[in-house]
Amino acid sequence: MINKSKRNFFRRVSSPLKSYIFPPYYEKKEDFLKCIECEDKDCLNACNEKIIVIENEMPIIKFDKSGCTYCDECAKVCKIGVLSIDKKRKIEAEMIINPKKCIAWNQTICFSCQDICQDNAIQYKGMFYPIIDENKCTSCGFCVSVCPTNAIEIKTL
Ligand code: SF4
Ligand code: SF4
Ligand code: SF4
């Protein structure tokens, strides 16, 4: 029988679930509802990039300081099995450069996002007009925080 605090928890988190970005080692987003049972939140400390924060008892990825290296460390320490290496997947988010905010779309030289992208997923036409190739992008998020004008927007999938 489900207790009252759990019932309230499920009610509170079921709608934001879709908008969250989770560490990429799960089967379905609903699995994170099990995190209410986890007191230690070991995944939080395991992440060397410090991109995991706890919200509504669940580990959420934020790209405002760094990105995900797909290092597996968060999955290795999860005792409850919400995260596990055999469920490794691509981060469920799409990165899009907003041409209105991007200075390289407005005739100012800037290669900050391309410089940090290890997957060579950002292409320019000459010196300007960068776009992200979704076939190459791993959604690691490293480009997001280096953009001086916050022009890289994240669409959760
Ligand atoms: S895979 Fe590594 S970098 Fe990515 S969230 Fe997990 S611990 Fe952090
Ligand atoms: S360690 Fe596992 S169960 Fe605990 S908060 Fe992280 S993902 Fe959830
Ligand atoms: S999110 Fe995509 S475009 Fe940005 S650094 Fe990672 S792979 Fe490159």
Image (tube, helix red, strand yellow):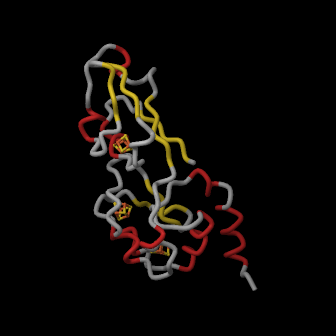
**Total numbered labels placed on residues in the image:** 0
In-front residue for pair 82/40: 82
The percent position of residue 17, horizontal first and vertical second, equals 61, 57
Location of residue 139 with respect to 110 vertically, above or below:
below
The percent position of residue 26, horizontal first and vertical second, equals 51, 67
The percent position of residue 10, horizontal first and vertical second, equals 68, 68
Quadrant where ligand 3 appears: top left
Location of residue 118 with respect to 26 vertically, above or below:
above
Can I make out residue 45 in this image? no
Q: Among all residues in the image, which is located at the extreme right? A: 1
Q: In which quarter of the image is the N terminus?
A: bottom right
In-front residue for pair 12/155: 155
**Is residue 142 rendered to the left or right of residue 83?**
left
Q: Which residue is drawn at 67% across and 61% down?
A: 14
Q: Among all residues in the image, which is located at the extreme top? A: 107
Q: Quadrant of residue 110?
A: top left
Q: Quadrant of residue 102?
A: top left
Q: Residue at x 58, y 50 (%)?
A: 19
Can I make out residue 151 in this image? yes
**Is residue 140 rendered to the left or right of residue 58?**
left
**Is residue 148 rendered to the left or right of residue 137?**
left
Q: Residue at x 33, y 46 (%)?
A: 142
Location of residue 37 with respect to 60 vertically, above or below:
below
The percent position of residue 108, horizontal first and vertical second, equals 28, 16
Q: Among all residues in the image, which is located at the extreme bottom? A: 1
